[in-house]
Image (cartoon, grey):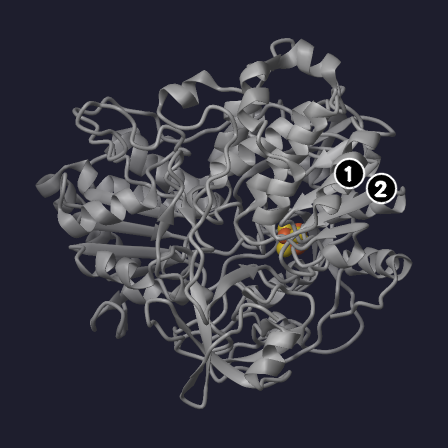
Amino acid sequence: MAFNITRRKFLQSASLAAVALPLSGALASESGITRSPLEPKGSLQDETVVGGVCEMCFWRCQLVGKTRGDRLVKLEGNPKSIDNGSAICARGNAGIQLLYDPDRLKYPLKNVGERGKPKWKRISWEEALDECGSKLKAVQDKYGPQGLCMFPHGSTAKYPMHFMERTLGTHNVSEASFFQCRGIRDMAYMATMGMPPGEFVDMPNAKVIFLLGGHFGENIHVSHIKQYIQGLQNGAKLIVVDPRYSASAAKSDIWVKIKPGTDTAFLLAIMNYLVSKNKYDAEFVEEYGQGFDEFKEGIKDWSLEKAAKECDIPAAQIKEVADMLAANAPNVSIHPGRHVSWYGNDFQRQRSLACLTGLLGAYFVKGGWVPGKEPKVGKTSWAKKEHDGEHNLNLNADEESIYPYSPPGTPTELIRDAALTGKPYPIKGCVIWGQNPIQTIPGQEKMKEVLQQMDFVMCVDVMPTDATMWADILLPEVSYLERHDLVKTGTQWNFADKHQQYITARMPLVAPMFERKDQVYITNEIARRMGYEKDIPVQTVEELVEKDLSVANLTLAQLKQEGGIHLREGKDPYQMPEDFEILFFNEDIADAGFPGVPTYIPVEQGPAGYARLLYGRVPVHTFNRTQNNIWLNKAMPDNPVWLNDQAAAKMGLKDGDVVGFINQDGIKSRTTTVVKTTPGIRADSVYMAHGYGSANPLMSVGVDAGVDDTSLITKITVDPETGAHGMRNNFVKLTRDGKIIDIPAAV
Ligand code: SF4
């Protein structure tokens, strides 16, 4: 833990970190495919290809590629970008090692072994598509469309997902980005101020940046980090609430070392203090607020002292945070967060954040929450057909929603429970597209049982993952560097100068290799085989992109000519919409049987000798997706477990000791990692980076590297309003040399 890096040095180094990081490593593979594109060596006489859009994470930075012959030799940010500019992060730079990874899926494969213990046989596309079409159709004929489910992720999964939902007619689609990540945030803000919040905070103009669990610096999205750094350079104060001394906490003015799960109590005490001391924006609340009296009444018991006890932090610190926010309002960036599926009480916490932003008058003002107003483009896809009886698992016998604030799709547990019990109906066909439900969704063994009972499982991916081991048919997809894909829009975020919008589209930087295909080809060919030829909306992915661009009077050729990005004049982002309102008390939530005023719901504490398992991100990996990338693996090959230094001393552990884990249900980790002792984590918690510990032997770099945190999340918690998962309610002890070591709670 670099406690001694000064804020000034951090700002300098962070600015550099946001720029492309060249990582060395030219390794030849046994298969004869060269991992490194930098051969033959010699001076670079490269051609620049425009139109790339990164997909090493979901942020979609705009790229240019340097090619030599038919080889891509370097990736850079597109200098025309008003988003990431010429900067890309380490993962973006290492995309080239995904492209040329010899472990990548190359041909359609059929599993002639068992699910989970596959033996792969190369087959032709014709045979693979025939099998996918006939097996999915057989499930549809026998069980109805509701007998099919899908776990999609990423931009290419949208087209097949719409085929499944709109044309085939199954509701049983569960996106990890909603049900294990940001869905709760979006639904809570929509229920409070009518819009999903994105990460739209005007940090460059903020006087205070408030992060609840956000760990910028470990979690890197280039333009967002640039805005954050710009805000800090402009003098913004930083408040970080986190049980762990994260990269952000290390740069903060106030670090609130909160007890995990109690964040809502902390927020309620701040809001009650602001209201009772008349330190809130009464004029803003009067103009835009609804249900303020009920809100005031509902939070009145949350004194600073009560919250201090619950959150295990000083009352004076809660007051200090509240006073800092009030003194700088309305120019405060209350960050809405992204991955917020934490404790199963998360909808109420996200509502609290949205209400706090309102109390401070921090919507549509400089430094506050300000949505980028983006240009309109098309959304070409499959048309919705009429279906008999829609079999929505999220409706009970009285046709009422079980999870009334569910994000789009169906909550994962409803799908898995139906699949395992056959009630209210069987689910026997599964499409996994770009998602890794084995390492994304809590209850790994449950997920395996779900897949095991299917009549048919097909996977489409770029790389082998732990999920692809469960496929009957495995199809190789072209990577983001080899395909046309989405149309991406955005705005220029330093609103101080001028307002600009951009439109770009993902275009290939190199031609696809081997027999990899794109999402439109694969979906259309399966649809044809299932009898949906006449419903096919486009014949090629280029046609899809052209149609979407045409809504903005653009073409791919024009975009190319303009350097890959079209710029236009933007709209005033600070202009408040006419019908804007903040529901401090939401009557609909109350009518549905949930607290209409943000309410703290305590979470279960762990048994003695166990610590709460927390997880998060690192700057050089995007969860499991990048684990096999040889450059990124070199940068961070495993995920050390953070252990409180005093607790570690009592346990007889020191930095570098090799340990495993056992959780409260007796589940042991399959692999081990090393200890990192630090005063920067509470004694009641341990922390590790998410996404490590892959079990797939086809990942020659990432297999068995570090520990799979998801394998230890066996107790399943579900947020009652949304049906999304809470994933931080599991507890672990450490193991060493076969012995189990208790973790002392108090040090
Ligand atoms: S933040 Fe990094 S990995 Fe994500 S899109 Fe941008 S360059 Fe790619």
**Which residue of the protein is positioned furthest toward the bottom in this rendering?**
737
Q: Which of marks 1 and 2 is nearer the N terminus?
A: 1
Q: Which residue is drawn at 83% across and 43% down?
A: 237
Left of 485 or right of it: where is 331? right
Vertical arrangement, residue 360 with respect to residue 564, above or below: above
Marks 1/2: CA–CA distance = 8 Å
Alpha-carbon neighbours of circle 2 within 10 Å: few (<14), some, or many (≥20)? many
Q: Could you tell me if residue 84 is visible in this image?
A: no
Left of 246 or right of it: where is 724? left
Question: Of 587 and 451, which appears nearest the observer?
Answer: 587
Q: Residue 148 location in percent, x, y?
A: 22, 43
Whether the residues at callouts 1 and 2 have beta carbons within 8 Å, the answer is: yes
Q: Is mark 1 on a helix, strand or loop?
A: helix
In the image, what residue type sits under mark 2?
Ala
- Quarter of the image with the C terminus in it: bottom right
Q: Residue at x 40, y 39 (%)?
A: 159
Residue where numbered disc 2 is placed: 236
Q: Residue 621 location in percent, x, y?
A: 59, 63
Q: Is mark 2 on a helix, strand or loop?
A: loop
Q: Could you tell me if residue 691 is visible in this image?
A: yes
Residue where numbered disc 1 is placed: 203
Ligand 1 within 8 Å of the CB at mark 2: no
Left of 354 or right of it: where is 368? right
